[in-house]
Amino acid sequence: MKKAMLTSLMVILALLVLLPFLWTFSTSLKPLNEVNKFPPEWTSVNMSLKSYSDMFFYLPFSTYTLNSLIVASSSTILTLLIGSLAAFAFSRFQFAGKNVFLLIFLLSQMLPGASVIIPLFQLLQKVGLYDTHVGLILVHTAFLLPFVIWLLYGFFLAIPRDVEDAALIDGCSRMQALRKVILPLALPGMGATALFAFLGSWNEFFFALLLTSSDSTKTIPVGIGLFVGEYLDVWNQMAAAAVLFSLPPLILFMFTRKTFVKGLVAGAYR
């Protein structure tokens, strides 16, 4: 009886979570004149995939998608590369100011992006990286790095030092021990961190809006915002873009869900 009640509760909660996505998908299939119909209806006899084809016709969404993939993937790889080295150093070495640096990393996550957008904008313009993939990748990396360091710091602390010491005794250098022993053991945590970093870059809107100006560098979140016009809001095409926008993270999560779940609990034990 308790199991049935718990299952029913979980199904209800799952439906509540999926409800916005299902409504968005339903909206993407409706013609524009039925989107704002009152009272709202889930289905329509005129449902079609026309919004999806129109979305690519009026805006270069294939380019936006490619830009998002380039920026999110590059930011994730660069952040993991730098963050893993930094987190390993923080977890294994004692040095002056260690706790201060960790506190600064934590406090930086409370800093709103709007507070630094003007100097960032001026800096990217002066070095010629405004409206470029490289500029956006570097900005995303800079803002994701403290979060990644803190996550990986916990994962590395959970790995016993004896394992690393054994590798050093066997003749490995510190970097070889990291590459051959520590990183394979921290793989679930690395996978979970990579997924969080990818989603953080993939969903980012503020910097992508203000640090890009051409279609060749705009990302999907910025492209979705372009459907809001001065005289007309194309809600059905916006919903179609939102559905397509959510598919890559969903697919990525489906293939990495086991690693993700393992990674969530891997850093909980020390």
Image (tube, rainbow, N blue to C red):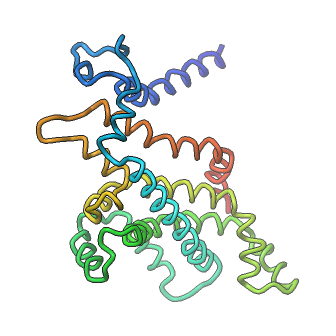
- Whether residue 108 is visible here, answered yes or no, is no
Instruction: Identify which residue, 217 or 80, lies in the foreground.
Output: 217
What residue is rendered at 27% in x and 32% in y?
235
- How many numbered circles are shown? 0
What residue is rendered at 37% in x and 72% in y?
135
Q: Is residue 196 left or right of residue 125?
A: right
Q: Is residue 52 left or right of residue 99?
A: left
Horizontal and vertical percent position of residue 263:
64, 54
What residue is rendered at 43% in x and 55% in y?
68
Q: Residue furthest right?
A: 170
- Whether residue 218 is visible here, answered yes or no, is yes
| In the rendered image, the vertical position of residue 130 relative to residue 47, given as above or below | below
| In the rendered image, the vertical position of residue 194 relative to residue 233, given as above or below | below
The quadrant holding residue 195 is bottom right
Q: Quadrant of the N terminus?
A: top right
What residue is rendered at 26% in x and 62% in y?
213
Q: Is residue 93 left or right of residue 25?
A: right
Q: Is residue 233 left or right of residue 223?
A: left
Q: Quadrant of the C terminus?
A: bottom right
Horizontal and vertical percent position of residue 152:
59, 66
The quadrant holding residue 110 is bottom left
Q: Residue furthest left?
A: 231
Q: Residue furthest bottom?
A: 96
| In the rendered image, the vertical position of residue 174 relative to residue 117, given as above or below | below
Horizontal and vertical percent position of residue 6:
60, 22
Horizontal and vertical percent position of residue 28:
36, 28
| In the rendered image, the vertical position of residue 59 relative to residue 243, given as above or below | below
Q: Residue furthest top?
A: 45
